[in-house]
């Protein structure tokens, strides 16, 4: 296959949907020679913050001289973004020709699996297998591995050589798949916990923390928790944040959002643990890695005139974090919202949380089968905001708002269309 054919194959494999379970994934990896076996993994599960924590960890380890492979989902800018490599300051996506080569190899193994009576792997399983193959070929020192959904039955949960299991903030999301209480969701995410592998967690709700502690006790593993009482924020503005945490002082980050210092503190807890078990990670590498870390779609300014901010907030916890960021950076100000949300999300609650900060809401339909029609979302929005408009599509909305130099726009609701917004303003700036 060439890359065009590989992308057609990816589209075809999308029909196999989302199936939680590990048997098919384990067989696919066996057919491929188990490329995941010797990879040192930092495994990250949680509802929100996985990408930010993964970004900080990757950047610090790369600054310390390690070659780091990173597996990301969902992607924002392009397909190859899901598999990344970084050493030093240079961050690279997997090359298109490598994608084509690896998917050709995987497709042959799937044919053999099918002949033996195994079900066809899902697209996420195929992409996860491709990531393991790529990391093995690149001889990565570390793999920063984000869970796709949940944890216990996620395709990434086949890894055995895990240095540390990391739990970011856990909240209500994907309830149809993971359970309708936060305790059930926490239990699913705790499925990544391995026997005697240390667990490092964000500060969670009491009921969630209880589930994590119980799972750690059952697996005989140590539990380390962030201590946000030791997080001291020295300055926090649209220019970035300077903070100190435990022995790490005067840390600068450029990723915006009121919650990002806490995500950074969780990453620092992991770095502290890696230092304790013998990895050489200098103070300079920590500071440099934190300062250079970039993560698109998280309270990202894509245009100054007009001011346009994009954010991936797509569930209740993220919506609360978004309005806290608005209060922090732009207190007592109203925004023009451009919103698109998937139909399987709690879109009414998300609007209920955020609408007090809107003077106008424009709704759009996100791409893909899961996208909630803009017309339906606008009917909900009218319950919470007086001025509501149903947008035709994201590009036509952007063409119109880009001429409104004195206004402020906030684009959020789904990561699926943020790449279009970012690319539009990159091209037009």
Image (cartoon, helix red, strand yellow):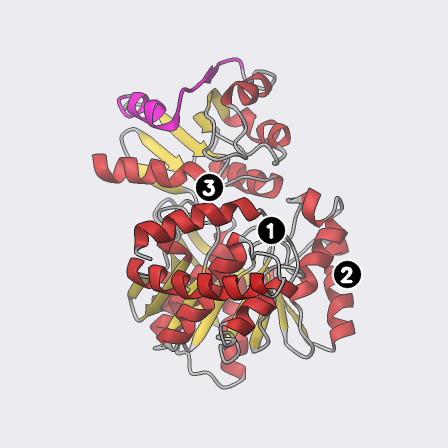
**Res 415 label:** 3
Give the foreground label among 3 and 1: 3
Number of dots carrying numbers? 3
| Residue in view at x 36 percent, y 74 percent | 138
* In this rendering, the label closer to the viewer, 3 or 2: 3
Question: In the rendered view, would you say 98 is above or below 164?
Answer: above
Between the C-alphas of marks 3 and 1, the distance is 14 Å
Secondary structure at badge 3 equals: helix
Position of residue 388 in the picture relative to residue 193 (left or right): left
**Magenta highlight range:** 386-403
Q: Between residue 226 and residue 348, name the one nearer to us.
A: 348
Sequence order check: which comes first, mark 1 or mark 2? 1
Disc 1 to disc 2, how far (Cα)? Answer: 17 Å
Question: Where is mark 1, residue-wise?
Answer: 47
Residue 79 in the image, given as x and y percentages of width and height: 38, 51
Q: Earlier in the sequence, mark 3 or mark 1?
A: 1
Give how far apart the Cα atoms at labels 3 and 2 are.
Answer: 31 Å
Q: Which residue is mark 2?
A: 210
Nearest the viewer among 102 and 361 is 102
Where is residue 356? Give x, y as percent. Answer: 55, 25
Magenta span includes 61: no
């Amino acid at each position: 296959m060439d890359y065009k054919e590989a992308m057609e194959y990816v589209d075809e494999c999308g029909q196999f949907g989302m199936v939680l379970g590990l048997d098919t994934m384990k067989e696919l990896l066996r057919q491929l020679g188990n490329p995941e076996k010797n990879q040192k993994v930092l495994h990250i599960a949680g509802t929100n913050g996985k990408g930010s924590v993964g970004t900080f960890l990757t950047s610090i380890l790369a600054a310390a001289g390690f070659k780091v492979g990173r597996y990301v989902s969902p992607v924002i800018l392009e397909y190859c973004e899901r598999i990344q490599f970084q050493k030093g300051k240079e961050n690279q996506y997997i090359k298109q020709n490598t994608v084509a080569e690896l998917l050709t190899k995987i497709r042959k193994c799937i044919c053999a699996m099918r002949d033996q009576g195994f079900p066809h792997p899902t697209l996420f399983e195929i992409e996860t297998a491709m990531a393991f193959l790529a990391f093995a070929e690149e001889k990565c020192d570390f793999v920063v591995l984000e869970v796709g959904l949940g944890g216990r039955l996620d395709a990434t949960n086949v890894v055995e050589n895990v240095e540390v299991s990391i739990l970011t903030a856990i909240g209500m999301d994907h309830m149809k798949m993971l359970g309708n209480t936060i305790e059930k969701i926490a239990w699913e995410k705790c499925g990544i916990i391995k026997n005697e592998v240390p667990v490092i967690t964000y500060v969670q709700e009491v009921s969630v923390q209880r589930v994590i502690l119980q799972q750690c006790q059952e697996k005989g593993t140590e539990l380390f928790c962030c201590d946000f009482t030791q997080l001291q924020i020295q300055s926090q503005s649209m220019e970035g944040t300077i903070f100190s945490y435990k022995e790490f002082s005067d840390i600068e980050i450029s990723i915006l959002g009121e919650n990002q210092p806490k995500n950074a503190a969780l990453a620092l807890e992991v770095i502290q643990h890696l230092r304790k078990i013998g990895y050489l990670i200098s103070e300079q590498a920590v500071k440099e890695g934190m300062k250079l870390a970039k993560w698109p779609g998280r309270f990202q300014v894509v245009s100054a005139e007009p001011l346009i901010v994009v954010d991936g907030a797509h569930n209740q916890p993220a919506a609360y974090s978004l309005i806290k960021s608005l209060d922090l950076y732009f207190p007592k100000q109203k925004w023009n919202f451009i919103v698109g949300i998937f139909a399987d999300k709690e879109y009414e609650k998300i609007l209920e949380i955020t609408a007090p900060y809107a003077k106008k809401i424009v709704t759009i339909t996100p791409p893909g089968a899961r996208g909630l029609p803009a017309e339906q979302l606008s009917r909900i929005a009218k319950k919470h905001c007086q001025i509501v408009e149903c947008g035709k599509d994201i590009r036509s909305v952007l063409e119109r708002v880009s001429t409104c130099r004195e206004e402020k726009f906030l684009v959020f609701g789904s990561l699926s269309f943020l790449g279009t917004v970012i690319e539009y303003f990159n091209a037009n700036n």
